[in-house]
Image (spheres, grey):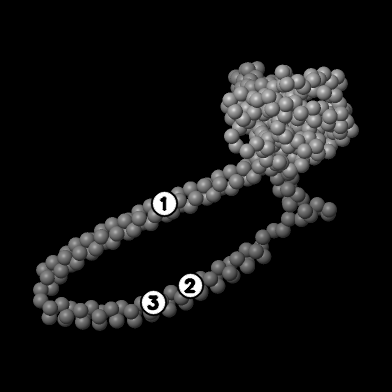
Amino acid sequence: MSSYLTSPFILEERRLQGIVDQCSRDFYCALIEVEEQEKRIKQQKKEQEERARDYDAAKEAAVLSGREQKKRLLEESRRKKTALVERLKNTEIEIEVFSEKYGGMEAAIERQKRLVLQLHNTLEDFEEIEQHVIRHEAEIQREIRTVSEEEAGARPRHVYPEGRAESRGKKGVSLQIKKEREAERAKDSPRRIFEDRLNRTMGLPYAGKLPSLEALKEQYDKEKDYAKTAFAVTHMKQLEAMTRQLEDLMKLEQRGLEKRNKDILRYRAICGLMEIPADEKLIADEKAERLLKHTCDELYRKYEEKQRERYITDSITCVMEKHGIFTQNSDASWGDDRMHYEMEHASLDVSGMDGDRLIMEVSGEYVGEEPTLNERRKGVSAASHFCSLLADIEAELRDDYGIVFCQVLTEKPREETIRMKRKKSVAAGGSRSSKKERFI
């Protein structure tokens, strides 16, 4: 019989592997959730940027349209004003000239009548002249056609040999084809190919990391025009090697970026499982790749340990409840490595779930300032009752949950040595949690 029990314990390989597999599934689900969240954030950010661009473009267009319209109205107002001022000046000048030249209104009316009559006669003369001009033009056109027909009949015809009737057309086509071929040869020349590849290589992201590339371009620019073709042929392979080197750097950087993004997603996923905030400074530090990976691995190891601890805690709780021993802190946080159970006239403390040595201790309870003899005897009786259940508890933990005690050390409960704990003023007994069984 004992009031104190301690024993190393192990968890069966099958149960432990089940916990590891469950942790892997949890992590995979959390990782997928984080990836989906990242995609949603990127999509929302992209949509927000597009809306912002559309808003800025619409705003800018509205501002420009307003400015253009305002400018146009202002110019139109200035033009109308200038035209009105000019018309006013011309009207004043006309009035002055009219007054000086014609005098009164009667003389002006008389002269207007004469002008109308003169205009009528002029129009009749103009119509007659127009008819004369039309007849004269028709005669000239007939003479031109006659002369053209006579010249066409007297023009000699060139006779082409048989089979070469299309030589004129072929000559023109040959000139065009020659020009196109010359353009193609210039386009495919070693110099043009070298220049295109050099410019494309100079535009790659990591071109600045190759001083030899800049030196090659400077050397090429210093060459004379007649020597650039030979330079291009000589250094073509060197340029191709530099291009491959830069492309390899780009691929390496891209792989590193993808790997870092994966590590960040893994880190956020495991932080979510551990219910702790992610360190944004660590995520933003591009030089802390090893630290980020190490932190992620360490958190995952802790998560597996916590899941193992939770499994052992839940298993012990289920077995205790079968025997009428209920937990007092079923909602305890993971940081608490002790479980407290309520018994009749005593309490049971279980610790060591986070390690490899399990400790169970039965403590008597008292109400006053000091424990009485009767309270000590009740505590010893409760400890003896627990000792009678110990064999069944050990067997159920081994058979049902795979928790195997290696070597059990006990202490016989006595009135002189039993530990006594002062009972709280509130009603003891705690909340009887619902039975939680977890089979892996």
Task: Please name the residue shown 10% across and 73% down the image.
Answer: 103
Q: Give the amino acid at mark 1.
A: Val
Q: Quadrant of residue 258?
A: top right
Q: Which circle's residue, 2 or 1, is located before the other in the chain?
A: 1
The local crowd at label 2, few if under 14, some if 14 to 19, many if 20 or more residues have their Cα within 10 Å, is few
Q: Report the disc number at residue 129.
A: 3
Q: Is residue 76 above or below residue 105?
A: above
Horizontal side, residue 16 vs residue 340: left or right: right
The residue indicated by pointer 1 is 63
Per the model, the C-alpha gap separating discs 2 and 1 is 60 Å
Can residue 296 be spotted in the picture?
no
Tell me what residue is drawn at x 43 percent, y 54 percent.
62
Residue annotated with mark 2: 137
Which secondary structure, mark 1? helix
> At x 79% / y 20%, what residue is drawn?
412
Q: Is residue 269 left or right of residue 61?
A: right
